[in-house]
Amino acid sequence: MSARGGPIATGRAEGFTLVELLVALAVLGAAMTLLASALWLGPRAWEAIEERTTAAHDARLAQLFLRRQLEQAQPLAFLAADGEARVGFAGERRLLRFVSPLPAHVGPGGMYWFTVEVAEDRGTSRLILRTELFQTEEWDRFDPAAPESLVLVEGLREAEFDYLGRAEPDRPPPQWVSRWDREDELPRLVRLRLRFERAGADVREELTMAPKASVPP
């Protein structure tokens, strides 16, 4: 008791010491740094994921479209510039040309030339599709409209086609080739290989397609 009868004060006054205040400021600063880093990296990570997803989505749609059309490719004959009748198919490493029915939801239907070409574009490559009406000498020919063009996939590092023929008795197994030289039949398999970079990752896509008309009856 004090001289006046009041309670005796014990302990220290409430508050923070200088050391505690400095520690609290250091923790707060570290937390703010982490928060700022998260806010900066978040949109970049999202953009990278979105960019990669979009590229993969475009490549997948292109592959599905080519598979559908090439599976319906027809070995229709046409008269070449040298006067010889040839099957409507040409295959090179960076160009594929075949005859297939045009989907009804795309145009008026009928048989069309489908040309898929790898074109250079500012240091990268793009896959371009062109379509035009298929005409033979037996038809009443007319001047067709300019070929319709569509970019299937862009921003590619590499894109190339390979071709595989049918196995034949008493002959070595067929090998993949970068050029199809047979003028009387379609290849058994066509392979498209794509390579592109998205968000620092090396992405590769491969599609193998089988023209149904190449299967012997």
Image (tube, helix red, strand yellow):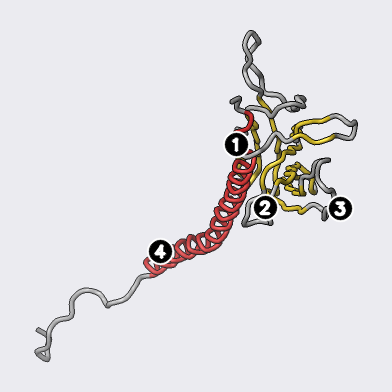
Residue plotted at (66% across, 25% down): 164
Mark 2, other Cα within 10 Å: few <14 / some 14–19 / many ≥20: few
- Frontmost residue, 210 versus 184: 184
Q: Nearer the viewer, mark 4 or mark 3?
A: 3
SS for dot 3: loop
What amino acid is at disc 4?
Val
Decide: is 57 above or below 12: above
N-terminal-most mark, 3 or 1? 3
Q: Which residue is mark 4?
A: 23
Residue plotted at (55% across, 53% down): 49
Residue 55, horizontal then vertical, whole percent: 61, 50
Q: Which residue is mark 1?
A: 207
Q: Nearer the viewer, mark 2 or mark 1?
A: 2
Quarter of the image where the C terminus is located? top right
SS for dot 4: helix
Quadrant for residue 92, please give it: top right
What amino acid is at disc 3?
Asp
Q: Which residue is mark 3?
A: 143
N-terminal-most mark, 4 or 1? 4
N-terminal-most mark, 2 or 1? 2
What amino acid is at disc 2?
Gly
> In the rendering, which numbered label is found on residue 28?
none
